[in-house]
Every structure is written in structure tokens, then in C-alpha cells.
Amino acid sequence: MASTAVSGPVDLRPFFGRLFLAVRTKSGLSQREAADRCKVGRQWLSRVENGHTLPGVEKVVRCAAGYGVPIMELLETPEEIKLNQFMSDLEAAGVMGLTRRDQVILITQLQICSVRSKATSASS
């Protein structure tokens, strides 16, 4: 069975935006308060939450510490963000023909990256 070719990189900014917004909202913090706790700029946090920029590993670690949550919480899909919305983001990014198998592979790879990030931050 041939896998579907992806035409160009997948834009995950909207996905991470919803994750960061959900964690901040759950914590009951304003953007300013969250930015101060996470030691990031409020405008940067706004750009992430609105799906305009991707957070780097260093800032994911800072935000997890600032929110007092495990790194995985900023990388996993919380209950409010359903897999269907994630797949809609992928489709909007031009990955229309992604098979269910490839969807599972992509999500698994994202989770592996988050586990590696957690292991790296725990060892430092």
C-alpha cells in the first residue's frame, strides 16, 4: 500500500495555538500574567495562541514551567481540542489526501517528540 505524498510542509501553528490557549485558559491567567510567568513576551504568546508562530522547544519548556504543567500538556491534545479539528488544520494546510494510517503516524511522531523533549528537560 503506497502512502500519500504530502505537498510541502504541514502547518501546525493553529494546532499549537489552540493547545497553548487551552492551557492558559485552564490556568485562569490573562495573556500578560501568563507571559510573565513563562518569561516570554505577551506579543509572542499572542502570536502562538492565534496560530501565527510555532513555539520552539526552549519556550515550550519555559511555558510548561510557568503554567506548572508537564511539558506533555503543551504538546498533547487536551479534551477540548478534538482530533477532527487537528485533521481539519492538516487539510487546510494542504494535506487533503492523508490516509488514516498516516494521520496516526503523524500524531505518534508528535507524541514521540514531546516525550524526547520531556526526557531532555528532566536530565538537565
Image: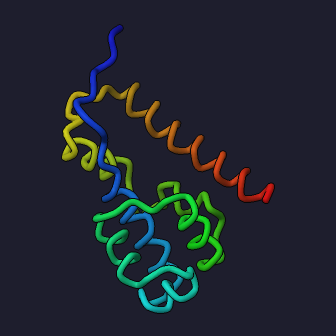
For the point 34% across and 78% down, which residue is it? Answer: 46
Marks counted in the figure total: 0
Quarter occupied by the C terminus: bottom right
Among the 4 quarters of the image, the one containing residue 7 = top left
Q: What percent of the width, then of the height, locates residue 30? A: 43, 90
Write the residue at 38% across / 48% down: 83
Q: Quadrant of residue 87?
A: top left
Instruction: From the top left corner, tell me how far across and down residue 47 is, in percent.
Output: 32, 72
Location of the N terminus by quadrant is top left
Above/below status of 13 relative to 23:
above
Q: Is residue 101 above or below residue 90?
A: above
- Residue, x 36% and y 56% (percent of image)? 15
Is residue 91 positioned above or below 29 on the image?
Answer: above
Does residue 37 appear to the left or right of 29 in the view shown? right
Q: Residue furthest top?
A: 1
Q: Position of residue 9 (x, y in %)?
A: 30, 39
Query: Which residue is at the front of the view, 15 or 7?
Result: 7
Whether residue 11 sits left or right of residue 78 in the image: it is left
> 122 left or right of 58?
right
- Residue 118 is situated, as x and y percent measured from the top left of the image, at 68, 54
**Residue appearing at x 52%, y 54% in the figure:** 76
Which colour style is shown? rainbow
Instruction: Tell me: residue 115, above or below residue 6.
Output: below
In terms of depth relative to the viewer, which is nearer, 103 or 54?
Answer: 54
